[in-house]
Each structure stands twice: as structure tokens, then as C-alpha cells.
Image (tube, grey):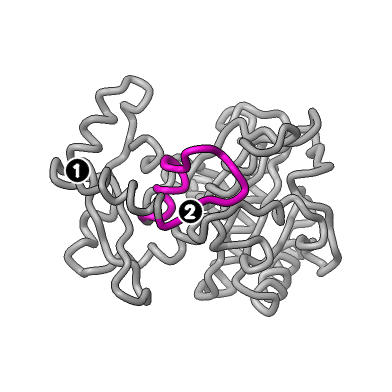
């Protein structure tokens, strides 16, 4: 259940990949893991530890699972989880679908793959993974000094390879966010970096990079244009940007029963100018 406080929503296949792979490996029986996960989920649902909602647009009405009232109460009994916020998904259950499920599902597939990949590679260590509910930073702007704005990346990973660690924010783009909103998030990221808020909020002394994962290359190029446009407005802007597509990173692999190393491969990542860039998980030292 602690995982659900990080991931917010998980499908039965994702739960199977996280907890019911008998021996860590590059491939596993996705069907068997799904069956084992379904039995555990059923028991937890009966006791209101979990609740479910339908994932929009999936054949057969696939469900995603989130913390129920007893799950929230149980986690809050843990001192380390006492600030846990109730899931927002409960209020959406009556609609028959959680409109964030498509986005969260894609983001979580990537995060789970990285967690499993770290178990399979001796040279990759994931020290910390945080989800949206744990990533709320308030930044001030010159124009609105009295009203801090909320900067909320989709996820955060701290880790690295071969003794070189890095801090990374991730944004999972599903193609429906307007240009103005993307630029706004980039500008808030600049303010977050400029005010060095990462030192107190994340306990790190390097600038975290901002990584965008788009559904396809056309959308990735669109995101790159919005980053460039936002950068024109901020002459003092500091930061690192990485862009890739979900398809090339293996966005559905953990639900299909395998782990991919594609996120570590340089050929799948680009910078905001459209140039090939090394993977954010390798050779990234951060800016002091």
C-alpha cells in the first residue's frame, strides 16, 4: 500500500510486476503475475484498503486501483506516513472512470521499469522515487511575489550509474496539454532552480534536470518548441532538459512482462533544440 501512496494508481499488471515476480529477471509470465495480484487485490478491496476505477478507453473496461479509506488510515498509523494526503480518485469513482488514469498509467510503467532495472543491473542504483502527491513546491515570481505558485512535476527519481548520481524530474505528456500550460510549468521550473529550492525541499546540491516523455516525435518536437519559447523569456534561466518518446522508451513493457534498458540508451533522448543527447541516467553531473 505504500507503493500506492507514491504511484497513486496501479493496474493489476503493474501490481503483479512490482510484487509478484517470483525471481527478478528480464522477462516473466505476465499472466501468472496478474492472477496472483488479482487474488491479493480482491482481499484488500473487501476490507476497503483499496478501491478501483475504470481506465478510460481500454477494451473490456480495465480497472486501476488506488487507496481506499482503510488503506489511508492504515498508512497514517505509520509515523513516517502521517502527512499522507487522501487520494483524490475516490471522488471520481462515481463517474466510472478516473480521467488521470491514462496519464498515471504511462508514468508508472516508466517508474516501475526503472525500479526493476535497478535490481537487474549492478551499475544502476535508484535511491529515491517520488510521485506527484509528494512533489508540491511553492515558488514566487517577480510579478506575483505575494502569491506563491505551485510547481508539481509528475515524478522524481534520484539515482545513477557508476558512482555518478543525478536528480531528475519527469513529465509524462499524453498530448492534451496546451502550449501555455507547458510553458508555464517550464517557467516555474526555472524559478524553482533559480531560487535553489531543491536544496531544502529535496536535500540535494545540484540542479535537477527536467525530462519530458511524449507520446510520439511530433509531440516531442512541439514540447521542445515550448521549452525554447519559455527560455526566451528568462535570460537567467538555468536547467537541463531531456526529451524522449514513450514508445521508444518501452512505455508498456512492465505490463507485457519484461524490463527494457532503453531509458539508459543515448539514442532515444534529445535536448530542447532537437539534438541527440545522452541519457539523463548517464553522464549527468548536474549544475552547481
- Bounds of the magenta segment: 12-31
- Position above or below: 184 against 264: below
> In the rendered image, which residue does mark 1 sit on?
43
Could you tell whether 36 is left or right of 108 in the image?
left
> In the rendered image, which residue does mark 2 sit on?
29
* Classed neighbour count for the residue bearing mark 1: other residues with Cα under 10 Å, few (<14), some (14–19), many (≥20): few
- Position above or below: 15 against 220: above
Q: CA distance from mark 2 to mark 1?
A: 22 Å
Q: Secondary structure at mark 2?
A: loop
User: Quadrant location of the C terminus?
Assistant: top right
Q: Is 23 colored magenta in this rendering?
A: yes
273 or 215: nearer the viewer = 215
Q: Which quadrant of the view contains residue 3?
A: top left
230 or 60: nearer the viewer = 60
The residue furthest left is 46
Q: Which quadrant of the view contains residue 79?
A: top left
Q: Is 11 colored magenta in this rendering?
A: no
User: Quadrant location of the N terminus?
Assistant: top left
Could you tell whether 133 is left or right of 164 in the image?
left
- Position above or below: 223 against 89: below
Residue at point 83%, 53% (across, down): 278
Q: Secondary structure at mark 1?
A: helix
Give the image location of residue 129, x and y in percent: 54, 38
Asked if residue 237 shows in the view, the reply is no
* Classed neighbour count for the residue bearing mark 2: other residues with Cα under 10 Å, few (<14), some (14–19), many (≥20): some
Asked if residue 117 shows in the view, the reply is yes
Give the image location of residue 104, x and y in percent: 44, 58
Residue at point 37%, 35% (across, down): 2
Q: Earlier in the sequence, mark 2 or mark 1?
A: 2
Amino acid at each position: 500500500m505504500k507503493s500506492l501512496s507514491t504511484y497513486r494508481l496501479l493496474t493489476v499488471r503493474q501490481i503483479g510486476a512490482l510484487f509478484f515476480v517470483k525471481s527478478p529477471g528480464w522477462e516473466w509470465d505476465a499472466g501468472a503475475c496478474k492472477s496472483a495480484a488479482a487474488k491479493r487485490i480482491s482481499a484488500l478491496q473487501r476490507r476497503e484498503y483499496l478501491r478501483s476505477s475504470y481506465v478510460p478507453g481500454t477494451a473490456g473496461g480495465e480497472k486501476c486501483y488506488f487507496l481506499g479509506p482503510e488503506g489511508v488510515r492504515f498508512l497514517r498509523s505509520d509515523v513516517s506516513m502521517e502527512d499522507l494526503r487522501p487520494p483524490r480518485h475516490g471522488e471520481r469513482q462515481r463517474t466510472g472512470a478516473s480521467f488521470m488514469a491514462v496519464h498515471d498509467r504511462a508514468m508508472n510503467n516508466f517508474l516501475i521499469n526503472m525500479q526493476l532495472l535497478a535490481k537487474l543491473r549492478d551499475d544502476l542504483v535508484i535511491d529515491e522515487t517520488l510521485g506527484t502527491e509528494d512533489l508540491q513546491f511553492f515558488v514566487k515570481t517577480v510579478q506575483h511575489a505575494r502569491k506563491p505558485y505551485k510547481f508539481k512535476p509528475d515524478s522524481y527519481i534520484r539515482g545513477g550509474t557508476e558512482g555518478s548520481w543525478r536528480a531528475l524530474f519527469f513529465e509524462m505528456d499524453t498530448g492534451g496539454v496546451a502550449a501555455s500550460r507547458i510553458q508555464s510549468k517550464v517557467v516555474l521550473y526555472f524559478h524553482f532552480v533559480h531560487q535553489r529550492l531543491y536544496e531544502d525541499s529535496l536535500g540535494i546540491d545540484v540542479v535537477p534536470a527536467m525530462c519530458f516523455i511524449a507520446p510520439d516525435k511530433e509531440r516531442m518536437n512541439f514540447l521542445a518548441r515550448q521549452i525554447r519559447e519559455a527560455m526566451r523569456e528568462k535570460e537567467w534561466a538555468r536547467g537541463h532538459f531531456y526529451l524522449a518518446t514513450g514508445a521508444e522508451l518501452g512505455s508498456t513493457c512492465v505490463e507485457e512482462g519484461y524490463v527494457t534498458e532503453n531509458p539508459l540508451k543515448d539514442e532515444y533522448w534529445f535536448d530542447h533544440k532537437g539534438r541527440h543527447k545522452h541519457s539523463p541516467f548517464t553522464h549527468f553531473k548536474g549544475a552547481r
